[in-house]
């Protein structure tokens, strides 16, 4: 009789272990892990302690990447502003150059001087040569 009881107890134990659902175990583990993360208890795990340097390295690289993108965007804006200012200065240069050319034309100068009473010379220009003998 004792043998049959042992066999029956083994069969009963096997049936009990089969009745536990596997999905509930996974749900319980993921729920427990989620609560550990929210509570900060996951930091006590050994695999987290081993990887903490790597996590800090990744965080530092992410911060450098974000800072670099902000810096590049700022430089791009500055370059656009400087290009716009350069175009404005170039247009101002062209305007000033054309106005100077217009004001320094011989006909414009002659008309302005005729109002003040000065007239344009009609005789060609002559070169005056002084000899050394005449200086003394």
Image (spheres, rainbow, N blue to C red):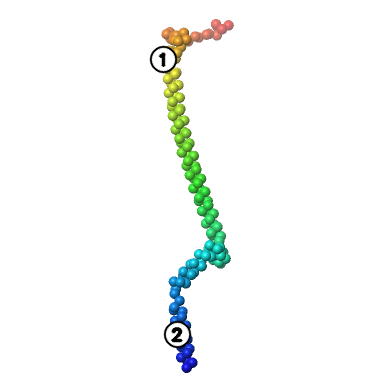
Q: Position of residue 51 (x, y in %)?
A: 54, 62
Of residues 53 and 131, the one drawn nearer to the viewer in this rendering: 53
Determine whether 86 is above or below 57 in the image. Answer: above
Residue beneath the point at 45% across and 28% down: 92
Q: Position of residue 126 (x, y in %)?
A: 46, 9
According to the picture, the residue beneath numbered tag 1 turns out to be 107
Q: Residues within 10 Å of mark 1 (few under 14, many from 20)?
A: few
Of residues 121 and 19, the one drawn nearer to the viewer in this rendering: 19
SS at badge 2: helix
Q: Is residue 22 left or right of residue 59?
A: left
Determine whether 76 is above or below 19 in the image. Answer: above
Residue beneath the point at 53% across and 52% down: 63
Q: Residues within 10 Å of mark 2 (few under 14, many from 20)?
A: few
Give the number of the mark in front: 2 or 1: 2
Residue 9's tag is none
Q: Is residue 8 visible?
A: yes
């Amino acid at each position: 009789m004792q043998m049959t009881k042992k066999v029956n107890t083994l069969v009963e134990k096997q049936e009990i272990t089969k009745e536990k659902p596997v999905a509930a175990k996974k749900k319980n583990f993921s729920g427990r892990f989620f609560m550990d993360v929210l509570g900060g208890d996951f930091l006590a795990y050994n695999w987290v302690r081993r990887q903490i340097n790597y996590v800090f390295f990744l965080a530092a690289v992410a911060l450098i990447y974000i800072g670099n993108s902000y810096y590049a965007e700022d430089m791009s804006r500055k370059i656009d502003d400087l290009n716009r200012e350069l175009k404005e200065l170039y247009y101002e240069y062209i305007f000033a150059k054309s106005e100077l050319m217009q004001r320094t034309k011989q006909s414009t100068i002659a008309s302005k001087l005729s109002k003040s009473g000065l007239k344009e010379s009609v005789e060609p220009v002559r070169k005056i040569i002084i000899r050394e003998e005449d200086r003394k």
